[in-house]
Image (cartoon, rainbow, N blue to C red):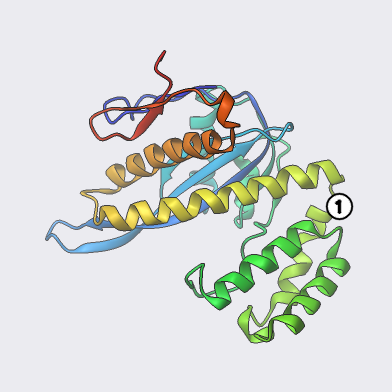
Amino acid sequence: MTRTLTKADSRVPVALCWHYFSAHVEELRVQVLAANGTPSDLTATWALGVRADGDWESLGAWPGAAVGPAFWRSVWEDLDGRGVDRISLVCAADRDARVLCPGVKVLSPLRWGLGQVSVPAASGVGVLRAEARRVVRDASGVRPARLSLERLLADSGAGRAALSPDWLVWLEQFRAFYALRPHRRAVVRAGDEYLEQLGLSLSRAVRRHGPFVDLAAAVSFVAQTISRDELRLKFSKLPKATRPALHLVGPDAAGLAPPSQ
């Protein structure tokens, strides 16, 4: 599905696929100017959905942290109004996400728990955490994941201290993930990887932007940025011979679309 998002129409709901196998939720800290002009840290939440065939798209962004029935109910009402009929799995830390839709299964995010302090992705610890996440994603169960992590830490020279001290306890949370059939684990794994790729570019864009006038402006910026980066990421994976020509859309160049759009 081709979507065009510009600054002028960013408030118009974008139609979505009716069924996603998994939805992956991420929180982002943004700076918002207070009445006295002082920036303060607030939270915006964004998510992407992955279909059973592995295709994916951004679901949008919302104000506030992904916590509590009220938040999840408002998100589901938004998604329901945009055509989403069902989400099978939600990867989120808050168990209140079960109110998102009937029968949803909530899984702990695979990317959480391997370190409580943010570190540069290119640093030694950042690289180790990325490798550890890959090991957890690719394992077939808790025991194989534990053994693979032990080997990784032994070979890295960084030792256990590079990860959370309770990473063995954290690993136990993923029994529900490993209980999925292999092809379904692959879908969830892919969604987690997509979220990580988009999250890096989104964080950079928010830092470059600086403080927002209010939380609504921050959420709108996040929604536009992930839609733009989604298209760019998918475009970059196409064989060069099949890539359509793209041009920038909107006064702020926030959107991409084929020339025919």
Q: Secondary structure at mark 1?
A: loop
Up/down of 251 relative to 127, above or below? above
- Where the C terminus falls, by quadrant? top left
Whether 242 is drawn above or below 74: the answer is above
Task: Say above or below: 119 vs 43.
Answer: below
Q: Position of residue 74 (x, y in %)?
A: 48, 38
Front residue (pair 255, 7)? 255
The residue type indicated by label 1 comes to Ala
Which quadrant holds residue 151? Answer: bottom right
Q: Residue furthest front?
A: 241
Position of the N terminus, as image quadrant, is: top right
Task: Name the residue located 64 percent from the left edge and 54 percent from the top edge.
Answer: 95
The x, y position of residue 4, in whole percent, is 40, 24
Please identify the residue farthest to the left as the structure is shown.
36
- 160 vs 135: above or below: below
Question: Residue 75: percent from the left, percent from the top?
Answer: 50, 38
What's the residue at 69%, 79% (across, down)? 166
Q: How many marks?
A: 1
Q: Which residue is mark 1?
A: 179
Q: Looking at the image, which residue is at 28% across and 31% down?
A: 7
Task: Count neighbours of disc 1 (C-alpha within 10 A) and say few if under 14, some if 14 to 19, many if 20 or more.
Answer: few
Which of the two residues, 158 or 117, is positioned nearer the viewer here?
A: 158
Residue 65 appears in view = no
Decide if residue 180 is on the left or right side of residue 137. Answer: right
For the point 69% across and 81% down, the residue is: 156
Foreground of the two, 242 or 27: 242
Asked if residue 118 shows in the view, the reply is yes
